[in-house]
Amino acid sequence: MFIPKRVIFEKGSLDTEIGKNIYDKIKDNPNIEIINATSNKINVHIPGNNLFEQYRSGKQTLVVGTRKSLKFQTCKPSANYQLPLVSGCMGRCEYCYLNTQLGDKPFVRVFTNIDDVLNKAKEYIDERLPKITIFEGSATSDPIPLEPYTNALKKTIEFMADQEYGRFRFVTKYNDVDTLLNINHNNHTEIRFSINTPKIISTYEHYTASSHNRIEAAVKVAKAGYKIGFLIAPVFLYDNWKNDYKDLIKSIKQQLPSDFDKPIMFEIISHRYTTKAKNRIFQIFPETTLPMTDEDRKFKYGQFGYGKYIYSKEQLAEMKEFFISNINDVFPNNIIKYII
Ligand code: SF4
């Protein structure tokens, strides 16, 4: 659960149910500064003289406000639309794509008008009838650490349960799932857990849940009847990577109930970076040990005019073969969606 250092309430947000709920939860905590913003200039309340400081202050800041634009972004290929419930994330993963997305102050923002967002989702579903419309809840955030404050996922899951043609999915590196266990999801929501080897988590995924806790949360939601999946990402090909990823796959199996026989979905993504991301990472994490030597990678031109540095063709082929064989060995009943 996210425990911020400061909470900024935008105008009108304290009159909403979510705003009041957040205020009640934090008001007696002397370590949390409460700020009532009178203008839209949120950044003036977040300290920091340079990107390094601004990043850290931003990650400790929760902004409570209304979602003004109700136009949803598309979200191909994993879904049809992004569902904007939260933006930003308390985690500080060194390689995170949000580092280049959220500007100089990557604060966490929750939206108080979830009903408006869900009404809009209904319009998008109706527009596409009779096709199923899939919404992704974690395109610009990890919504789970905010759930104890907002119940936004709970509301969305219950809303989607009633939508014959609507589906919902999100991915997380956290484990605050208890409020999602005893609700009606009608099998319309899929929860994926992003996992990695203990070495990668402890080196690069700061302020996230441990691999054990994430798998434990996955077991809880699986027992509650949700479809579950694991996103193994980003995969790093370091010394001994095969042993570590093999152990990771086995540890999922060990934690699942022995009679668990539902299909488990896997998505595997190798580490990649752009020059823009690399430059930003060096400003935010000057001591980073992320492997980002361009000469060691293959440059792949991207569709949006910028390219990525990826592992070589041979390395990717080896990685693919490794994951297919190890996942098939341990989970005969699996669905590997992609390995890239
Ligand atoms: S948990 Fe996910 S969204 Fe949050 S910082 Fe890490 S990679 Fe980014």
Image (cartoon, rainbow, N blue to C red):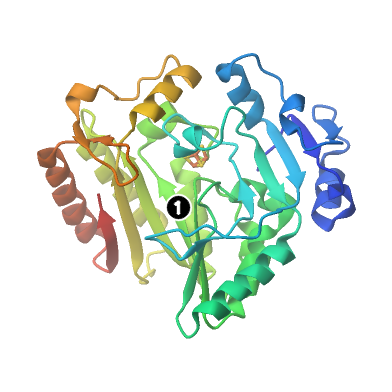
Up the image or down, 297 lies above or below 164; here it is above
Which residue type does callout 1 highlight? Answer: Phe
Using the image as rendered, state which of residue 86 and residue 173 is in the foreground.
86
In this picture, residue 296 sits left or right of residue 140: left
Q: Position of residue 47 (x, y in %)?
A: 71, 20
Q: Is residue 85 visible?
A: yes
Question: Residue at the location (45% across, 36% down)?
Answer: 96
In this picture, residue 232 sits left or right of residue 329: right
Question: Residue at the location (21% across, 28% down)?
Answer: 239
Which residue does the numbered mark 1 point to in the structure image? Answer: 193
Q: Is residue 183 visible?
A: no
In this picture, residue 29 sits left or right of residue 185: right
Using the image as rendered, state which of residue 290 and residue 266 is in the foreground.
290
The number of callouts visible is 1
Question: Residue at the location (49% across, 52% down)?
Answer: 216
Task: Using the rendered view, name the quadrant where residue 212 is placed.
Answer: top left
Question: Residue at the location (35% across, 63% down)?
Answer: 265
Image quarter where the N terminus lies is top right
Up the image or down, 257 lies above or below 18; here it is below
Q: Is mark 1 within 8 Å of ligand 1?
A: no
Q: Residue furthest bottom?
A: 130
Q: Residue furthest front?
A: 305
Q: Position of residue 35 (x, y in %)?
A: 84, 32
Q: Position of residue 166 (x, y in %)?
A: 53, 75
Is label 1 in a helix, a strand or a loop? strand
Q: Position of residue 247 (x, y in %)?
A: 29, 43
In this picture, residue 66 sits left or right of residue 221: right
Disc 1: CA contacts within 10 A as few (<14), some (14-19) or many (>=20): many
